[in-house]
Amino acid sequence: MPFAQIYMIEGRTEDQKKAVIEKVTQALHEAVGAPKENVRVWIHDVPRENWGIAGVSAKELGR
């Protein structure tokens, strides 16, 4: 059972997250032959202040 964890800075819409889940599921199905019903996708919404880029938070960078 493939299990994909996706970390993204918070702020995506429900429709965007749905698209990620669908496309990651399809990619794993095609790449390794896993039945779609066995694929699990977990999206981690990370607060901007908890995401660092080059020593600065994404919030400070305006991302």
Image (tube, helix red, strand yellow):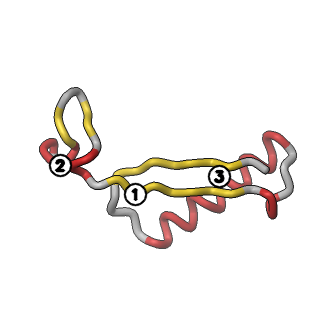
First of labels 2, 1 by sequence position? 1
Q: Residue 30, labelled with which disc?
A: none
Crowd class of label 3 (few under 14; some 14 to 19; many from 20; radius 10 Å): some
Which of 37/12 is in front? 37
Amino acid bearing label 3:
Val
First of labels 3, 2 by sequence position? 3
Q: Pointer 1: what residue?
A: 45
Q: Quadrant location of residue 32?
A: top right
Q: Are marks 2 and 1 in contact (CB under 8 Å)?
A: no
Tell me if residue 22 comes above or below residue 51 in the rendering. Answer: below
Tell me how far mark 3 sits from mark 2, CA to CA: 27 Å
Q: Residue at x 28, y 43 (%)?
A: 51
First of labels 3, 1 by sequence position? 3
Which element type, helix, strand or loop, lies under badge 3? Answer: helix
Amino acid bearing label 1:
Asp
Q: Residue at x 12, y 44 (%)?
A: 60
Q: Quadrant location of residue 19?
A: bottom right
Which element type, helix, strand or loop, lies under badge 1? Answer: strand
Amino acid bearing label 2:
Lys
Q: Pointer 3: what residue?
A: 24
Which element type, helix, strand or loop, lies under badge 2? Answer: helix
Q: Please state the horizontal and vertical placement of residue 27, each as a whole percent of the image.
A: 72, 48
Q: Pointer 2: what residue?
A: 59
